[in-house]
Amino acid sequence: MAYDIKTIGVLTSGGDAPGMNAAIRSVVRSAIYKGLRVVGIRRGYAGLLNGDMSEMNLRSVSEIIHRGGTVLYTARSDEFNTKAGVEKAAEVCRDRGIDALVTIGGDGTFRGARDLCRAGIPCIGIPGTIDNDVACSEYTIGYDTAMNTAMESIDRLRDTAQSHERCSVVEVMGRNAGYLALNTGIACGALSILIPEIPYDIDRDIIDRMLFTQRTGKKHFIIIVAEGAASATDIAKQIEEKTGIDSRATILGHVQRGGRPTTEDRIMASFMGYKAVELLGNGIGNRIIAKKHGQVMDFDIEEALSMHKTIDKSYFAMSSAISL
């Protein structure tokens, strides 16, 4: 089914991710270039329900490509997660003359977009989440920046861990997905990495490795923990009790969400935003933009949400081998 689309709404939803502004900029300018009208919806689906929106122009998105966060703000909405809420949101779109939506976020954002598609409002989803856990895509906007932010923080912690010959246990984001922890841990040379996808034994996976490397001359240790795998505070306490090595926990928290997006995030966000508008300009909706096999492509939204994604365990095995 081809849609007649003259006005596009754009919103960001869920957790913010560096590069969202670059995606917004790309959507707005690509749409205007194609002769389409663009409405910016503030505070995600909550703002859509409340009519919190305004028309955007070329200058609305000037000087934002380098900024973290999202100029459209983001929020969660319990009301939208109901059938009545979705129907109300669709009606708001029709009342405001919004023919289609570009929604930037993660799986929760896409489930909302799918529900709007079913209610008759065509949507295109752009993956923006630091967890990199959107199943249909190898890469999500914000992931590279978050990894680099975590890496830089851990490099600084390494300096003090080395100076005091202690163990630094660092907790990074990743409630249900360990991509951020695994790749940051590899980049920082962490001795052990704990992620939600792989069960761990503290004696086998941390204590024994620490004692072995200590016998070979190692005097300081970095342990990376995904928040969904364990508590850094609890792990640090157990390490100190079992080894006598001074151990400190650091929880990086929301610092990982902020900061200037990297080159990779800016380019990928720009390309995905352009691709979203290209589809809508051709009357195509109900799709999720994704990076697959190094290429930017799109999937049917229902198909995309049925996909599954798993950690590449060869990366985990490699990290265990080279970090002793």
Image: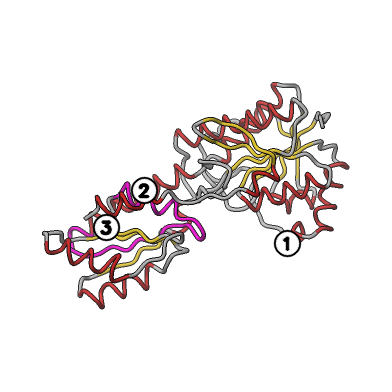
Q: Which residues are magenta?
A: 161-188
Mark 2 or mark 3, which has the lower sequence index?
Answer: 3
Q: Position of residue 76 (x, y in %)?
A: 67, 57
Helix or strand or loop: what does disc 1 sit on? loop
The answer to which quarter of the image holds residue 234 is: bottom left
Q: Indicate left or right for 92 with 63 as reference.
A: right
Residue 131 colored magenta?
no
Q: Are marks 2 and 3 in contact (CB under 8 Å)?
A: no
Crowding at dot 1, Cα within 10 Å, few <14 / some 14-19 / many 20+, comes out as few
How much space separates mark 2 and mark 1, taking CA atoms?
A: 38 Å
Q: Is residue 7 above or below residue 225?
A: above
- Name the amino acid type tagged 3: Leu
Foreground of the two, 193 or 318: 318
Q: Quadrant of the N terminus?
A: top right
Q: Of 224 and 253, which appears nearest the observer?
A: 224
Give the residue displayed 48% in from the left and 45% down from the top.
143
* Marks 2 and 3, how far apart at CA: 14 Å
Outermost residue to the bottom: 241
What residue is pinned by disc 1?
Answer: 78
Q: Residue at x 42, y 61 (%)?
A: 198
**Residue type, label 1:** Asp
Q: Determine whether, in the image, residue 110 is placed left or right of residue 51.
A: left
Task: Measuring from the top left, give residue 162's x and y in whole percent.
Answer: 19, 58
